[in-house]
Image (spheres, rainbow, N blue to C red):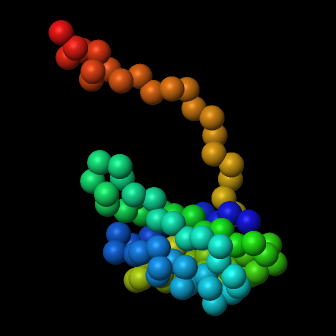
Amino acid sequence: MDIYVGNLSYNSSDQSLRDAFAAYGTVASANIIQDRETGRSKGFGFVKMENDQEANAAIEALNGASIDGREVKVNEARPREERPPRRDNFRSKNRY
């Protein structure tokens, strides 16, 4: 099961996220999403747990709990929505 974790501290790391969820079962992966340009955390991430029962226990226990000093929002991740391609207006305006 893929789990969404929101309202993370900007100081949180993949390892601190993994450690928080490991108390409830086996964590396959834990990733904090970072801004492409700055490399800074966007304040949310995803955890993948193979066992749905362990994942549900983690969601129930950690939703509203404090991780790295911030009260986090935890729920089952929804599938990513399809979006139309981005238009890059900056390049087209400054091409000539």
- Left or right: 85, with 91 as reference point: right
- Would residue 73 be seen by someone viewing this image from the given angle? no
- Left or right: 49, with 15 as reference point: right
- The residue at 65%/77% (across/down) is 27
Residue 70: percent from left, percent from top: 43, 78
- The residue at 65%/73% (across/down) is 28
- The residue at 57%/32% (across/down) is 83
Instruction: Report the front residue among 6 and 13.
Output: 13
Could you tell me which quadrant the N terminus lies in?
A: bottom right
- Would residue 42 be seen by someone viewing this image from the given angle? yes
Q: Quadrant of residue 81?
A: top right
- The residue at 55%/26% (across/down) is 84
Residue sitting farthest toward the top: 96
Residue sitting farthest toward the right: 53
Instruction: Report the front residue among 83 and 30.
Output: 30
Number of numbered discs present? Answer: 0
Instruction: Report the front residue among 85 and 5.
Output: 85
